[in-house]
Image (cartoon, rainbow, N blue to C red):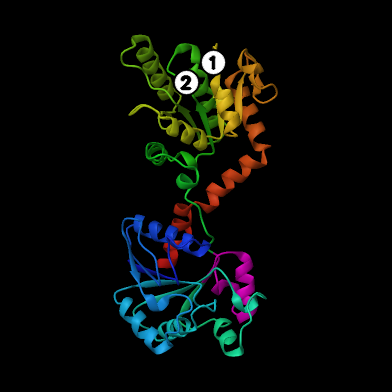
Amino acid sequence: MHVALIHYLYPPTVGGVERVMAEHAALFARHGHRVTVLCGGGESREPGVEVGVLPELRPGSETAAPEMRRILETALVGVEVAFVHNLMTMPFHPGATEALAELAASGGATRFINWIHDLAAINPDYTLEPPLRELLAKAHPGFTTVAVSAQRQREFCDLTGIPPEDCPVIPNGIDPAKVLGLTPTVAELEQRHRILGRDIVLLQPARILRRKNIELGLQVTAALGTAGHDAFYLVTGAPDPHHPASAAYGDALRGLASALGLTHAMAFASETSPVTDGDLQGLYALSDAVFLPSRQEGFGLPVLEAALLRVPLFCFDREPMASLLPGVPVLVPGATAPEEIATRILGTLNADPAFRARKEALKRYGWDRIYSDLLRPLLR
């Protein structure tokens, strides 16, 4: 579809609404829509997003409603759905608010959506004279109304008298790859294996050597799966084709992964290219916990890396890892079976409010989830 996003300004202007609009624009473009942003100032920084600057739309412009209607009507030719962000509820351009109200009520080819971030009519920081307050306190005919939170929904419904079902909540979202600072390589790995959608992601920062005991990590991942969890195992290293023992061990691990039903539940992160420092930090960010089942280590640097990056770490009660940061790694007895280790990991993580909050944020507020569950039905 051809969709338009309308607001006073657009990035690089810094602001909460501007940021959400940029996320919306990139999201719609990524899902195949033609996207036009209409604003008083801004520029496109995303492929597939066209920015149309209308100087008359800048906040504080005194362009009157008739002229503003003509300008907007021309700019919206061919647009099927127009998302109007805050213009119908904030006092920064009354002429544009009136013009958009008239266009929506006219029943033309463009469908209008009033996207409510803020409400000046109930905000004591704004002193509104009666004509302007009445303009901003209405549920204007011809608009589909959306609020960004349950609070804004309640406030708008109380203000206008419309029922909540006529003002659905569609929250702001997050782009996990951007927030987590993933490199393009790690972002592509995440997309290919849908890693952030998994119930639990374990990371083993290790070369492909038998003393790293990677097979136990695979067995723990399988045990998590048997317990009903969608688990994924990330190993930083890849088999070294120039080292026969490493290559043979890598082949054996792939065979074990296949036998355990983990073909699509594990990955060697450096299979296609070496893991850079930035990639490594991204792999930690993707992971819910680090698991170090090594039979021996000379030092155990991942203990320190995980601590700095605030990723829970599980390892055996073995030196030198056990004493690097006393009390920090969650230690498991060396003879523990995979099922017991899986239970220990799950129990520890589920008791951690940060882990639960992370999973809830990814489940409910990822932009792609919001698009598929809420925005796509709205467009239809």
Q: Nearer the viewer, residue 275 or 42?
A: 42
Q: Where residue 380 sits: x, y (%)?
A: 39, 67
Question: Is the residue marked by circle 2 packed among few (<14), some (14-19), or many (20+) residues within 10 Å?
Answer: many
Q: Considering the numbered disc 2 on the image, is that residue within a helix, a strand or a loop?
A: loop
Q: Where residue 126 sits: x, y (%)?
A: 63, 77
Q: Is residue 162 located in the magenta-colored stretch of the structure?
A: yes
Q: Nearer the viewer, residue 154 or 118?
A: 118
**In contact (CB < 8 Å): disc 2 and disc 1:** yes
**Residue 380 visible within the image:** no
Q: Quadrant of residue 293?
A: top right
Q: Which mark is residue 294?
A: 1
Q: Which mark is residue 206?
A: 2
Above or below, 210 against 276 in this view is above
Is residue 105 left or right of 220 when viewed as pictured?
Answer: left
Q: Nearer the viewer, residue 182 or 83?
A: 182
Q: Earlier in the sequence, mark 2 or mark 1?
A: 2
Question: Is the residue marked by circle 1 packed among few (<14), some (14-19), or many (20+) residues within 10 Å?
Answer: many
